[in-house]
Image (cartoon, helix red, strand yellow):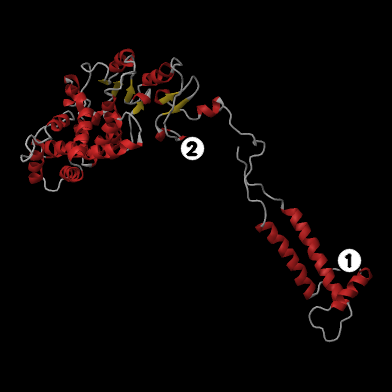
């Protein structure tokens, strides 16, 4: 425990000040009775010598103050008091805690974090609970609810933490479900209590709700977020030498994703989806050097309809900086990255949207995201989903609900 600043006692300083005050008064009086030397007006050395030789001739008790002795004594007392108020140790100390002060909280201390209604608590242990809603707690118990649960496989992270908190049924939930068991074990219970169940299954792609990232893109800044999430989610190494190619590919991705966003969503011609990027990549090369490719013509049409749009600026920047073999290499990298959308199941999974993220905070919803534990081929889709989720949910909470967020319980984050 941090102690208050140690207060110094005033009485010893007062006693020293009074003693010094009297001593100066007595010396001034002794100086006054010493024989003066003619012609000396300030400090008379002869007087000082006389004081040294005859100091015992004067009584030590003398309370008859002169103006000079009163000023001298008062100055001495003032100096001591200034020393008390201005000089000294200003530190705070933790006495008896030199080797640390960590300890387990008592049950009484833990209980002070609980909500008055147990169903509004987050459960950590038999006695350890914390109210989920800060507005229902005392001010000094209003903490953020971010929780890190660490344990080896089989230690019971899911059984002892995730399941009990799902059974509280006190908010909407987003749960990663690497084994795909949680939805089977808790889904019926949640559904019986009025929850909508959403399953995003990257293990069995055909047994899943659909997720279309374009449904949650609201401005051109989201183009960069989606491109970054896809490239980060499919990156195979952290080799610094690959940064050049990543940046080159990022330009291309922003252009193609941006084209679909502006042409499909802004102009409202069709519902775009991320698999269409793979279709654009297939039609980007010219079959004849003198004839613009299909994609080039598409960008020309978009520029006519939306002059100076972000997608066209990225497209022009890409073409002006890369050509020949370099451009071919960038196109090859991007095509390889999006080859996964050649699977019909993946195209179907991302063609439309039935996740309805915008309703997760206004309707009781439990979302289960099943991610393969050993196969990371499709994890970039989950990465993209989490990117848009952590943009959409705070946006809804801040702009519409004024602060209410669903509870996210991601498990085995390294797989995402």
- Residue 96 seen from this side: yes
The image quadrant of residue 74 is: bottom right
Q: Eyeballing the image, is 374 above or below 220?
A: above
- Residue occupying image coordinates x 69% and y 59%: 83
**Residue 78 locus on image (x, y percent):** 71, 64
The residue beneath circle 2 is 140
**Residue 403 locus on image (x, y percent):** 33, 36
Q: Give the left or right position of residue 288, taking residue 102 as reference.
A: left
Front-lying residue, 29 or 381: 381
Classify the position of the C terminus by image quarter. top left
**Residue 395 locus on image (x, y percent):** 28, 37
Q: Eyeballing the image, is 19 above or below 123?
A: below
The residue beneath circle 1 is 61
Q: Give the left or right position of residue 234, taking residue 344 as reference.
A: right
Of all residues, the one furthest to the front in this rendering is 325
* SS for callout 1: loop
The image quadrant of residue 197 is: top left
Classify the position of the N terminus by image quarter. top right
Label whose residue precedes the other's in the sequence (2 or 1): 1
Q: Eyeballing the image, is 58 above or below 167?
A: below
* SS for callout 2: helix
Residue 395: which disc? none
- Residue occupying image coordinates x 65% and y 58%: 86
**Residue 411 locus on image (x, y percent):** 37, 23
Q: CA distance from mark 2 to mark 1?
A: 61 Å
CA neighbours of label 1 inside 10 A, class few (<14), some (14 to 19), many (20+): few
């Amino acid at each position: 425990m941090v102690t208050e600043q140690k207060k110094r006692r005033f009485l010893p300083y007062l006693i020293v000040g009074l003693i010094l005050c009297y001593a100066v008064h007595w010396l001034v009086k002794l100086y006054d009775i010493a024989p003066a030397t003619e012609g000396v007006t300030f400090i008379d050395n002869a007087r000082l010598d006389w004081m040294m030789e005859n100091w015992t001739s004067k009584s030590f008790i003398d309370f008859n103050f002169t103006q000079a002795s009163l000023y001298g004594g008062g100055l001495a007392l003032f100096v001591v008091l200034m020393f008390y108020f201005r000089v000294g140790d200003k530190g705070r100390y933790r006495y008896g805690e030199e080797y640390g002060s960590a300890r387990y909280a008592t049950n009484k201390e833990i209980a002070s974090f609980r909500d008055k209604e147990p169903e509004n608590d987050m459960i950590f242990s038999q006695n350890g609970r914390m109210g989920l809603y800060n507005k229902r707690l005392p001010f000094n118990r209003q903490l953020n609810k971010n929780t890190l649960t660490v344990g080896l496989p089989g230690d019971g992270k899911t059984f002892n933490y995730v399941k009990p908190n799902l059974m509280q049924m006190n908010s909407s939930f987003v749960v990663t479900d690497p084994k795909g068991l949680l939805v089977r074990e808790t889904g019926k219970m949640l559904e019986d209590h009025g929850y909508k169940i959403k399953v995003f299954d990257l293990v069995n792609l055909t047994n899943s709700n659909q997720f279309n990232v374009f449904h949650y893109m609201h401005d051109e800044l989201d183009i960069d977020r989606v491109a970054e999430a896809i490239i980060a989610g499919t990156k195979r190494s952290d080799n610094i030498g690959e940064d050049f190619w990543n940046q080159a590919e990022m330009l291309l991705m922003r252009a193609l994703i941006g084209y679909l966003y502006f042409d499909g969503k802004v102009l409202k011609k069709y519902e775009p989806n991320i698999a269409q990027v793979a279709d654009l990549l297939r039609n980007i090369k010219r079959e004849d050097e003198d004839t613009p490719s299909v994609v080039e013509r598409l960008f020309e049409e978009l520029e006519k309809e939306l002059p100076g749009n972000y997608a066209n600026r990225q497209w022009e920047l890409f073409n002006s900086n890369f050509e020949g073999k370099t451009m071919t290499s960038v196109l090859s990298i991007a095509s390889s990255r999006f080859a996964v959308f050649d699977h019909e199941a993946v195209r179907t999974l991302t063609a439309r949207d039935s996740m309805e993220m915008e309703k997760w905070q206004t309707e009781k919803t439990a979302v289960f995201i099943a991610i393969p534990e050993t196969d990371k081929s499709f994890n970039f889709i989950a990465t993209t989903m989490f990117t848009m989720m952590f943009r959409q949910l705070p946006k809804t909470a801040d702009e519409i609900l004024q602060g209410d967020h669903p509870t996210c319980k991601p498990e085995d984050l390294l797989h995402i």
